[in-house]
Amino acid sequence: MKMKKIFLFLLFYNLNISYVYSVTPDVFIQSTVNGASEILSKNISKEDKITQLKVIAKDTVDIKAVGYYSLGSIRKNLDNNQLIKYLNLFEEYFLKSFSSRLSEYTNPKIEVYGKKVLNENYTMVNSMLIATSDRPEVKIDWRVYTKNPNNPLIRDLIIEGLSLARTQKEEFASILNSNDNDINVLFKTLEKFSKN
Amino acid sequence: MFRKLVFILLSLIILSLNANAGSDGELVLKKNLNQKNVDKTKDCFEKINRATFAFNQGLDKAIIKPIAKGYRNLPDPIQKGTSNAVKNLTNLITIPNNILQGDIKLAFINTGRLVVNSTVGLLGTIDVANKMGFPKYEREDYGQTLGAWGFGPGCYIVLPVLGPSTIRDTAGSFANVLGGDPWYNASIHGNNQYLNESLFITSKALSGINFRSDNIESFDNLEKNSLDFYASVRSLYLQDRENKIKNNKRGNIDILYKDEQDWEEINN
């Protein structure tokens, strides 16, 4: 009897968890930006803001996939150890770069107002950074990976039509092309960025 | 006359350079209806470009950025008025390009905008048309028109002082001084007492300072967070131009990613 109760409890608990976390991509983005806006509006130091933004980014961005995409087809030539090293370095670089970019904004208000399903894996969510007296409105689109609807993840940020992932990919390609596709040069560059 | 000749010669040199650079079959400045090819832009002169980029950065840090910062300290109405006035002048290039791209309706709208802002809007310093509910202004230039006609971008180039461009966009810019910009024609060759060369140069300089002033933080942020600032600027410039040529108000995934398959391969 007791086992049955425990089983039922676990079943309902899991169902409840699934229900709570099953969100549509637009709701997911709105809740993510609300969280980020809250941090940016706080009266805390820039460093503290960056630390808290990194937590949000870790939970909501598919950093591994963005890392693979940024690396391009050269990833297929790397061995396992190199890939692991790359992903670790990339995560550090990405979190620093991403949170540092965002931390420049104070009290941003972002409104999500639309979405377009690209296919079963991706949805593009449309939002707008509301204009203030200091800056005009800015269109921001979010490429959300929806393969697991219970755990949507951001894979790209498109600001006024400019893709952050593509820019990053072309930047990495430029570093590799200038150095005979030597992955160690990219490793060093990523390391240097994260340490500075 | 001599100046025109120099411009024509320069255009021809640039176009012929492009033909050579594109002789490997990837980047020919010719009518290219295959979008995949149009999207590929090669950095044929990367070493020279990087050197020019470094020169431009030095110039920016020493002169342009300090001026832009000073400009920001001017009273808001002066900044707004200047911004509106230089933007209003760009209508003179936008309108012929609207026509060349077959968008006659938009050409009429922009002509209306120009007339209203230049008269009621006190030489363009007040954007009356915007207040009257005219559609949002989208600037067009001859580089965009060439792109819309199907010409590929050719090689990426960095111009001294002027910054990022492509062979196609530079060729488009030459069209301005070869008769395509009525503001240039009137102020340089107008033979009147009100307009002259220095007024034209001042308007262009103000336009550049206004742009730089609007983007001080964005550029600083981009530079600070880039692994290779040169490559970031190149990527952003090319994405922006692709969007403008396609009149994409939001990112189109075909333009954004070139090959959507890159994303599809990455599954968790």
Image (cartoon, coloured by chain):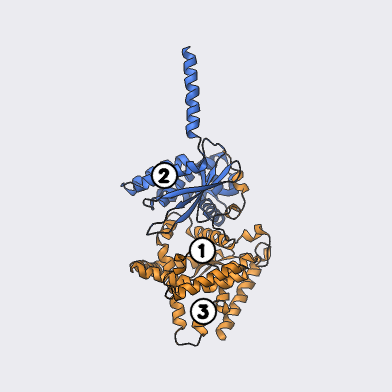
Chain colours: A blue, B orange
Please tell me how crowded label 2 is: few (under 14), some (14-19), or many (20+) other residues with Cα within 10 Å. some
Q: Are marks 3 and 1 on the same chain?
A: yes
- In this rendering, the label closer to the viewer, 1 or 2: 1
**Which comes before the other along the chain, label 3 or label 1?**
1
In this view, the residue in front, B135 or B56, is B135
Compared to A106, does A61 lie above or below?
A: above
- Three-letter amino acid code at the position of disc 1: Pro
In this view, the residue in front, B35 or A67, is B35
Residue A180: x and y in percent read: 57, 54
Q: Are marks 1 and 2 on the same chain?
A: no
Q: Are marks 3 and 2 on the same chain?
A: no
- In this rendering, the label closer to the viewer, 3 or 2: 2
The subunit carrying tag 2 is A
The subunit carrying tag 1 is B
Residue under the point 42% across and 52% down: A101
Quick check: can you spot residue A88?
A: no
Q: CA distance from mark 1 to mark 2?
A: 31 Å
Quick check: can you spot residue A155?
A: yes
Mark 3 — residue? B184
Disc on res. B135: 1
